[in-house]
Image: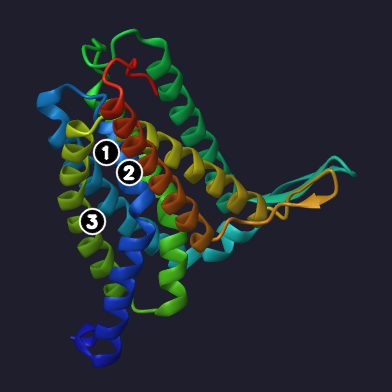
Amino acid sequence: MEIFTPENLVTLGMLTLLQAVLGFDNLLYISLESKRAPAENQAMVRRLGIGLAVVLRILLLFLIMRVIQLFQNPMFHIGWTDVIEGTFNFHAVIVLLGGIFIIYTATKEIFHMISIEDLEHEKRKPSSVVKIITLIVAMNLVFSFDSILSAIALTDVFAVMAVAIIIGGILMIWLSDHVATFLEKNRMYEVLGLFILLVVGIMLITEGGHLAHLELFGNAIVPMTKTTFYFVIVVMALSDVVQSRYRRKLIAENPSQPRVA
């Protein structure tokens, strides 16, 4: 019953809040990625993907707590003086690859949006349910590293961290349906969501570069802080809202004006 001590309960609350804050970008990715599945399977894909990710996240937590040094040990070094220098470990490589993949995914979807002629009646071949669930689980694990390492810094009680991960997973399952429904009813915000994913990818790449002590042309890579990330997201969201309202105002003043962005 060690978990029910006052100290552990306070830590559990902090870790649950941490899971919620750090899970925003992951939640957005899950909601957008699940839309590629057949409509009747999308809710199942989100729930199963998050559920499997929670189980694997707990296993990853168990593993990291025992072999954390292996994640920090250098794997290889790049020493091209004054061009690119860095020492890469497992953690840095995973975060960098995750950032690159998210940028690729978001960019591909943005180009797809601007290349189709009729977005409202878009006919797109659904992707494999297994493939989408695999991607959701894989990216969830990429996003897990920060939250797990932050959790280990707050407590060494495995049960507290595991319960926080489970609660966070349940919240993500509930919120993912709401986020997906909102995006389905307000498709204009899909573009905003994809550009947020681009920022997420950039954040992961800067984090991975920092972990690898990466330097490009003599300049060290500095990680984007969560504060900066959320500030950028707020500015992007406000810009989108102002632009939408201004466009509606122009159309109301001049109904004959073409409805273009």
Measured in 3D between alpha carbons, the distance from the residue under mark 3 to the one under mark 1, in whole angstroms, is 14 Å
Q: Residue at x 39, y 80 (%)?
A: 155
N-term mark: 3 or 1: 1
* Residue 204 in view: yes
Q: Is residue 203 left or right of residue 165?
A: right
Q: Amino acid at mark 2?
A: Leu
Residue 71 position within the rendered picture, expressed as x and y whole percent measured from the top left? 56, 57
Residue 224 position within the rendered picture, expressed as x and y whole percent measured from the top left? 58, 56
For the N terminus, the quadrant is bottom left
Q: Residue at x 39, y 48 (%)?
A: 238
For the C terminus, the quadrant is top left
On the image, numbered disc 3 is attached to which residue?
Answer: 169
Q: Amino acid at mark 1?
A: Ser
Front one among 81 and 254: 254
On the image, numbered disc 1 is attached to which residue?
Answer: 31
Secondary structure of residue under mark 2: helix
